[in-house]
Amino acid sequence: MKLIDTHCHLYLPEFDSDRNDVIHRAQESGVDKFFLPNIDSSSVNSMLLLSAANSGICYPMMGLHPGSVKDDWLREITIIEKYLFNTTGLKFYGIGETGLDGYWDKSYVHKQKENFQRHIGWAKELHLPITIHSREATEECIALIKENKDENLTGIFHCFTGTIEQAHEIADMDFYLGIGGVVTFKNAGLDKVLEQIDLEHIVLETDSPYLAPVPYRGKRNETSYLKLIVSKIAVIKNLPLEEVASITTRNAMRVFQL
Ligand code: NI
């Protein structure tokens, strides 16, 4: 069984004491690729170091997280852009994570939109997939993607927790739903959505160190827990584990152009 974690922040300090063990455990459980979304200028170095030390295993993306969009946005976005358009041969495999977050702080909504719009432009220009954070803003994110959609623009609605209608809209735009630990939470309702969405539109993720699946809910998440997420999806879809793994892995390879 081969799995891909399409969204994990293994470069964060939460893994400083046992990062290699965490990667090793994940590999033992079948994960052979880790996609690393950036957060902001402060996370770039550790992300690049981890990717360089694990070439062909860890794949970096570049972007500015909506939660890091503050008064110093212009300074941040300039740094991110410089990395993205570097002339040193440094390769990024996606744009993100970016998007909108309506949960924390409403005072930066306009800047978050401007930030997201900038990332969509990069994704189109560079023909790279975009990883979208859409917490409490799924409708707005779908609308912005729809407005900007062309034949090249694709990507992942990371940590999708929306409605069946939204899931269909995303699939119809040729985007993927990133499904993680939330699928194991009671009352999240994601099982009802997944029952009606074809596996062709789904990729797997952990969002480590956040959003650990049951029975680790509330604790530090790590990529080896991806197997709990696959198991849950296999039960929901009433399909063998191996089939869920192979279809979602193929989807991940497709969206990241590997
Ligand atoms: Ni994330």
Image (spheres, rainbow, N blue to C red):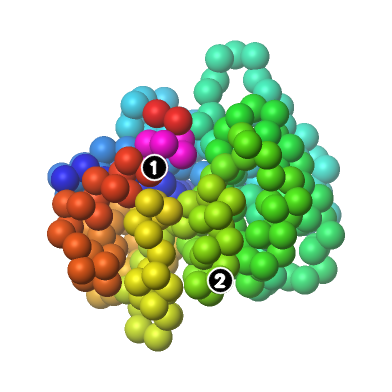
Q: What stretch is highlighted in magenta?
A: 252-256
- Quadrant location, the N terminus: top left
Choose between 134 and 9: the one closer to the eye. Answer: 134
Report whether residue 246 is seen. Answer: yes
The residue located at (32%, 49%) in the rendering is 248
The residue located at (70%, 53%) in the rendering is 146
Q: Do the residues labelled 1 and 2 touch (CB within 8 Å)?
A: no
In the rendered image, which residue does mark 1 sit on? 252
Quarter where residue 162 is shown:
bottom right
Quarter where residue 54 is shown:
top left
User: Is-magenta flag for residue 255?
Assistant: yes
User: Is-magenta flag for residue 193?
Assistant: no
- Quadrant location, the C terminus: top left
User: Could you tell me residue 17's position as x and y percent?
Assistant: 32, 49
Report whether residue 231 is seen. Answer: no
Picture layout, residue 106 above or below residue 178: below
Choose between 212 and 177: the one closer to the eye. Answer: 177
Most common secondary structure along the magenta stretch: helix
In the rendered image, which residue does mark 2 sit on? 165
**Label 1 vs label 2: CA separation?**
23 Å
Res 172 label: none
User: Could you tell me residue 165's position as x and y percent?
Assistant: 56, 71
Quarter where residue 216 is shown:
bottom left
Looking at numbered disc 2 in the image, what kind of residue is underneath it?
Glu
Under tag 1, what secondary structure?
Answer: helix
Image check: 108 left or right of 96? right
User: Could you tell me residue 69's position as x and y percent?
Assistant: 74, 54
**Badge 2, how many Cα within 10 Å: few under 14, some, many 20+?**
few
